[in-house]
């Protein structure tokens, strides 16, 4: 089943299985989104969130109280459900329907791509377009945070597999060529500043899933300041060394 067909049908019939796994992933996401928000802007209240492949709005509760929220997803019915949830929560949101790479370029300081990076790894071009879009949207010091599953050699695009996880997932996914993904992101100005197994945030989480955080390392002036004369302005919080060091073997 295509991801659009699967996530449109899942939007109408919320999954009931895999309760323990979903609960663990919810808890882990809550913790690492909060971690990323602290890194990006000292907390979610100062974050302008752009959620790439937002789905049914699973991350809305983790972003509640943010400065603004925009989600983009290719499954129209999932976005309808996101609006229903946002209304229930009293949270203002904007959304776009379509490929996340084609969302209009807009500034954010927290970009998310949770449990969806594999859908952009059918070709190198698709993944590159996503990374370029994220890099174009992120303000300096802004954080791009997401997950990926570490399988395969980590270098090849277009390696497909049909994933079925109870009634939660039934779609074709692609291996994430994480070696290339990190290298290419760095070329686009996104430096890896944090990399940890999902289980670091919740010990019940699925093994093999990793969380990454990248910071906009482009030497653009810090947000809210202007460049004067020929003086070079430095980033308020330069990217730190990777911690823990990414072992990409
Ligand atoms: C597992 S869900 C994750 C949803 C959300 N990020 C979360 O963590 O709750 C994957 C989402 O990726 C979306 N998706 C897949 N390919 C996409 C693309 N090219 N552009 C935008 N969304 C896409 C699917 O429609 C689905 O909603």
Image (tube, helix red, strand yellow):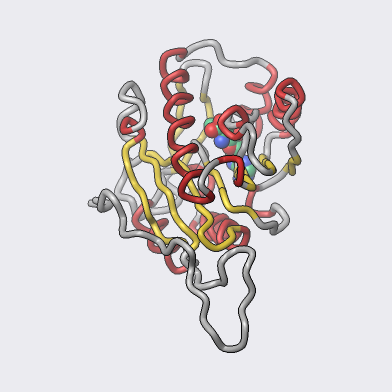
Residue under the point 47% across and 16% down: 166
Relative image position of residue 248 (x, y in whole percent): 27, 52
Residue under the point 62% across and 82% down: 228
Relative image position of residue 2 (x, y in whole percent): 60, 34
Residue under the point 26% across and 49% down: 244
- Residue 90: name its quadrant: top right
| Of residues 244 and 45, the one drawn nearer to the viewer in this rendering | 45
| Of residues 56 and 67, the one drawn nearer to the viewer in this rendering | 67
Relative image position of residue 95 (x, y in whole percent): 74, 41
* Position of residue 99 in the picture relative to residue 213 (left or right): right
Tell me, yes or no, if residue 201 can be seen here: yes
- Number of marks: 0
Relative image position of residue 78 (x, y in whole percent): 69, 29
The quarter of the rendered structure image containing the N terminus is top right
181 in relation to 29, above or below: below
Tell me, yes or no, if residue 2 can be seen here: no
* Position of residue 183 in the picture relative to residue 82 (left or right): left
| Of residues 65 and 197, the one drawn nearer to the viewer in this rendering | 65
Q: Residue furthest bottom?
A: 230
Quarter, ligand 1: top right
Residue under the point 24% across and 51% down: 247
């Amino acid at each position: 089943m295509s991801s659009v067909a699967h996530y449109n049908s899942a939007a109408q019939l919320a999954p009931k299985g895999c309760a323990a796994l979903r609960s663990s992933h919810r808890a882990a996401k809550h913790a690492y989104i909060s971690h990323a928000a602290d890194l990006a802007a000292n907390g979610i209240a100062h974050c302008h969130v752009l959620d790439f492949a937002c789905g049914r709005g699973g991350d809305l509760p983790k972003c509640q109280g943010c400065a603004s929220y925009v989600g983009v997803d290719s499954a129209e019915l999932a976005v309808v459900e996101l609006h229903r949830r946002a209304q229930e929560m009293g949270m203002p949101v904007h959304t776009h329907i379509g490929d996340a790479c084609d969302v209009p370029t807009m500034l954010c300081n927290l970009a998310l791509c949770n449990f969806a990076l594999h859908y952009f790894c059918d070709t190198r071009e698709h993944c590159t377009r996503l990374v370029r879009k994220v890099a174009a949207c992120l303000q300096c010091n802004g954080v791009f945070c997401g997950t990926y599953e570490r399988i395969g050699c980590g270098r090849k695009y277009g390696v497909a597999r049909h994933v079925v996880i109870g009634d939660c997932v039934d779609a074709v996914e692609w291996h994430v060529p994480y070696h290339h993904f990190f290298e290419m992101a760095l070329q686009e100005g996104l430096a890896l500043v944090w990399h940890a197994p999902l289980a670091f945030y919740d010990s019940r989480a699925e093994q093999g899933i990793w969380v990454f955080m990248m910071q906009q390392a482009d030497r653009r002036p810090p947000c809210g300041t202007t460049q004067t004369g020929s003086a070079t302005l430095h980033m308020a919080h330069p990217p730190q060394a990777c911690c823990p060091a990414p072992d990409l073997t």
